Image (cartoon, rainbow, N blue to C red):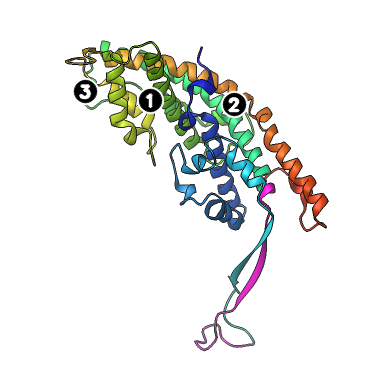
Amino acid sequence: EFLLDDQDDSRTDVRNLLTQRSIQSFMCLLEKCRDPHSAKWIQEDFLQTGNLLDFHGTGAKFIEQFGGSWDGALLSMVQQPPFQMIISAKRRGRGHGGWSKNNPYLKERWMEMPIDIDPSNLASRILLVREQIAEEWSLDLEVVKQANNQILESYFAKVRANKDVGDGSPAFDRTAVDMMNDNSRFGTIQASSPFRRSNFDLLYNLCTQASIHRLLRLLKSNNQEHTSEFTFLRDFYTDRASEYFDGVLPLGCADDFMEELLQTAPSYKQGGGGGLVDPLGAAEEIIRMRNIVAEEWQEAMRGVPQEHTIVRQALLTKQMQSWDGQSGGHDVDSDNAVFQ
């Protein structure tokens, strides 16, 4: 039996991706609600990352910087003290006192404004976004399984139709993309999170990568690391990891990887780890493993609200410390307010 904690390292742990996408989605919501200053603090001062809103990929570096666990960044954010950020804003228009705004001798007028930043409040609101995305992913992983089960059927149908999969036409139908582009799917729960479709693309990508990692570990644990099956999959994956799984990714990389694998011709490998190379067999094993991973991840997503207990306990402790040690400079009653 494949267990999430045993088989998924930090890089392929879906809970880490959930935290990453929750923070990115929350920053997007802050921008839309005209609070760019909190988003700027999260990105530049706290996480110390580049433009996180433009990052479409898995494995954001800040996860490892906070210990490689899903809750590391959130627990650290809870412990940050509230503070005021002073910003400068230009007054509207240069004209004043009856003078024309086009007068070149009038200087632009600026004003300073204090902005309250309460990190524990931000962490509490990120948890709410994280729970919503987890609910969406529990549904979206069903799409992964449905699309996964149709890949080989679609591939063999094209082969039976005497279509050459190497002539530039796709080796199989991109069912997952079609399902996610069906707007009727989004009427089942509350309004979708800001990056619903791109979240699905990354979830699908990470599920594929985790399946490959698990399959390689399984072969190695069965003392098959010197077989052609292991060496082919290892080399095929590592040679293409930077293109399909690492860094900023275009949409559809998971299907692109499977496409290239299915279009690879069988061969015979000489030397150590030699033998028959069967790309179709490797694809079948990845698809089988991806169903197992998706099933486990669905269960993990359903357990996210309970998993948040450790962060909520830290929030409560911080709140009680605030009551004991401060005279009331911040509104702690808003800590659990739903982000609108």
Q: Residues within 10 Å of mark 1 (few under 14, many from 20)?
A: some
Magenta residues, start to end? 98-121
28 on left or right of 337:
left
Between marks 1 and 2 in the image, the one whose residue lies nearer the viewer: 2
Q: Which of pointers 3 and 2 indicates the residue nearer the eye?
A: 2
Task: Name the residue nearer the viewer: 12 or 134.
Answer: 12
Q: CA distance from mark 1 to mark 2?
A: 25 Å
Seen at 54% across and 44% down, the residue is 24
- Answer with mark 1 or mark 2, whichever residue precedes in sequence: 1
Q: Is residue 142 among what the camera can see?
A: no
Q: Amino acid at mark 2?
A: Met
Q: Residues within 10 Å of mark 3 (few under 14, many from 20)?
A: few
Identify residue for label 2: 301
The residue under the point 25% across, 21% down is: 263
**Residue drawn at point x = 48 percent, y = 50 percent:** 49
Local SS, label 1:
loop
Where does the image place residue 26, in percent across and percent down from the top left? 59, 45
Residue 113 lies in the magenta-colored region? yes
The kind of secondary structure element at disc 3 is loop
- The image position of residue 60, as x and y in percent, is 47, 41
Residue matched to label 3: 166
Instruction: Tell me which corner region of the image, top left, top right, bottom left or bottom right, holds residue 191.
Output: top right
Q: Position of residue 198 (x, y in %)?
A: 47, 37
Per the image, the residue denoted by label 1 is: 174
In primary-sequence order, the first of circles 3 and 2 is 3
